């Protein structure tokens, strides 16, 4: 007999007993001992039925919740919690788990193959370009000779086969990631139009969130409306005398300033960034393409070695240096494969497509930045922050173990997305990654920060948002000045105090001028 028919028969018997009881009550009287005992027995049976029905309802509700959770892709099914379920349901959930794992693996494999396909196409285009732009068009015999010569060079060229000793013996994760950065840097520099400390590509961008009316913008852009309303222009703080402060400020306009904007005075010494190599555009000259093709071939073999690296076995510092290098190399590789994105939305889409297989798992750029390196959503780039709040990035348990254990704020100054406001790319080592990250912060602050002609501190949006994680908005200027070299810090504090003496006694005197994030393509490479 089925459960429903059994329940119906029990309910029927209970009802029949109930009507029999009522008839007995009328015939024998309500207060007889026999009637009271019968009522107690009937009450017990009803309570037992209610309890049984509640248990059955609870099981059905739990089963329904589990099935709904299994149909939701954002939740992971734990088979250990399904032992109390019917056998058929257990088999169904087991099949769902197996299918999800298979689908995830196939998706990762498709993304990896698609990325390699784009890379192969680019290398073919480079080879075709070299052939079609040669001085004399080759005939069929020449093409065969060219192909044989190319294969011979690949076998014999010491530059192509040159791999660090540590990589020849074993797949040292950090040495591998460092070599990938060196190789990708060589490719970008070979295709780039500028050289170390170049000024030719610098474009002075007016400081304005909308970048309109650039020709009419002046140093008054740095003044807040409240300052203009309270103090007339002739009584404003006087302009800084650059010549009297030549030990701190640059006296020549052609000095290399990688973060130059209109209305910002450059430092005489920008620190390590003065020796940075800037790549703001790419060239397709035949010689450059030939060298880039060789380096791409070499880089591809380095990427293949990533599959043999087990990041879960690395220490915290080893993971930190490894993933920073891998992220920067992956973004550069993605730009070569897919092109440079024009908007933050396209950049985030690119970050989800570009992926490497590391230790048997696929890691895309978004996963590395926000899951593996545990970076917070970038407040200076609200579109990406919004996308991260909507889209939930998913990684496996083993991928979680491959990431760093705690959030490292200074990683903000190590990751470069190849845009004008991004920090410079440098190579990080597991032995000194802590000191190298501190240097990255110090160098970026010294290179990007400046002052207006009237002494207001000018900072990038990225740095401003970073500083507000530690101090209030009114104290950001002083916080940043304490990360500058002693002479620069003393000069900035002197400017703040002078603005206060000239009548800016409220908190606005210590606030900064903030430069919006500049998403134009540009890479800076430090030696």
Image: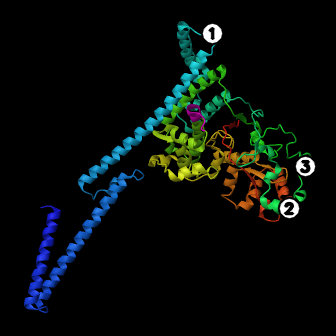
Front one among 214 and 59: 214
Front one among 441 and 2: 2
Q: Quadrant of the N terminus?
A: bottom left
Q: Which residues are magenta?
A: 333-341
> Cα distance, mark 3 to mark 2?
21 Å
Label whose residue precedes the other's in the sequence (2 or 1): 1
Residue 160, can we see it?
A: yes
Give neighbour class at mark 2: few <14, some 14-19, many 20+ (Cα, 10 Å).
some
Q: Quadrant of the C terminus?
A: top right
* Res. 61 image quadrant: bottom left
Task: Identify residue for label 3.
Answer: 241
Q: Is residue 191 left or right of residue 357?
A: right
Q: Report the coloring of the rendering.
A: rainbow
Q: Position of residue 398 (x, y in %)?
A: 45, 47
> Cα distance, mark 3 to mark 1?
61 Å
Residue 339 magenta-drawn? Answer: yes
């Amino acid at each position: 007999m089925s459960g429903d028919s059994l329940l119906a028969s029990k309910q029927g018997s209970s009802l029949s007993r109930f009507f029999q009881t009522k008839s007995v009550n009328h015939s024998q009287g309500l207060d007889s001992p026999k009637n009271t005992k019968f009522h107690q027995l009937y009450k017990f049976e009803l309570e037992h039925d209610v309890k049984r029905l509640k248990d059955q309802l609870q099981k059905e509700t739990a089963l329904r919740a589990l099935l709904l959770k299994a149909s939701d892709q954002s939740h992971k099914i734990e088979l250990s919690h399904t032992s109390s379920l019917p056998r058929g349901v257990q088999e169904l959930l087991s099949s769902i788990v197996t299918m999800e794992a298979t689908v995830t693996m196939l998706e990762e494999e498709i993304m990896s193959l698609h990325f390699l396909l784009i890379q192969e196409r680019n290398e073919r285009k480079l080879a075709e370009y070299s052939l079609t732009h040669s001085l004399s068009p080759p005939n069929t015999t020449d093409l065969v000779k060219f192909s044989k010569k190319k294969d011979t060079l690949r076998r014999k060229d010491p530059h192509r086969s040159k791999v660090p000793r540590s990589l020849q013996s074993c797949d040292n994760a950090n040495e591998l990631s460092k070599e990938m950065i060196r190789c990708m840097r060589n490719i970008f520099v070979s295709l780039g139009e500028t050289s170390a400390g170049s000024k030719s590509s610098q474009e002075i961008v007016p400081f304005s969130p909308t970048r309109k009316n650039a020709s009419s913008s002046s140093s008054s852009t740095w003044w807040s409306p409240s300052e203009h309303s309270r103090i007339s222009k002739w009584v404003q703080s006087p302009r800084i005398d650059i010549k009297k402060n030549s030990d701190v400020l640059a006296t020549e306009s052609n000095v290399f300033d990688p973060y130059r904007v209109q209305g910002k005075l450059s430092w005489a010494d920008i620190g390590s960034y003065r020796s940075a190599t800037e790549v703001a555009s790419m060239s397709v000259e035949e010689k450059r393409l030939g060298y880039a093709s060789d380096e791409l071939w070499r880089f591809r073999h380095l990427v293949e070695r990533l599959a043999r690296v087990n990041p879960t076995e690395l220490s915290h510092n080893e993971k930190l240096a490894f993933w920073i290098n891998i992220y920067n190399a992956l973004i550069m590789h993605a730009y070569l494969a897919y092109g440079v994105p024009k908007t933050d939305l396209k950049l985030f889409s690119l970050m989800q497509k570009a992926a490497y297989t590391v230790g048997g798992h696929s890691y895309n750029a978004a996963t590395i930045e926000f899951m593996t390196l545990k970076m917070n959503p970038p407040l200076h780039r609200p579109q990406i922050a919004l996308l991260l709040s909507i889209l939930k990035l998913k990684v496996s348990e083993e991928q979680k173990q491959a990431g760093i254990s705690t959030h490292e704020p200074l990683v903000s100054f190590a990751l470069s997305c190849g845009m004008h406001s991004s920090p410079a790319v440098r190579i990080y080592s597991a032995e000194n990654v802590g000191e190298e990250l501190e240097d990255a912060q110090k160098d970026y602050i010294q290179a990007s920060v400046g002052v207006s002609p009237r002494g207001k501190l000018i900072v990038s949006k990225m740095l401003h948002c970073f500083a507000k994680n530690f101090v209030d908005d009114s104290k950001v200027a002083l916080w940043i000045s304490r990360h500058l070299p002693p002479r620069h810090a003393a000069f900035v504090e002197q400017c703040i105090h002078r603005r206060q003496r000239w009548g800016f006694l409220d908190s606005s005197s210590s606030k900064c001028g903030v430069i919006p994030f500049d998403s134009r393509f540009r890479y800076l490479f430090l030696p």
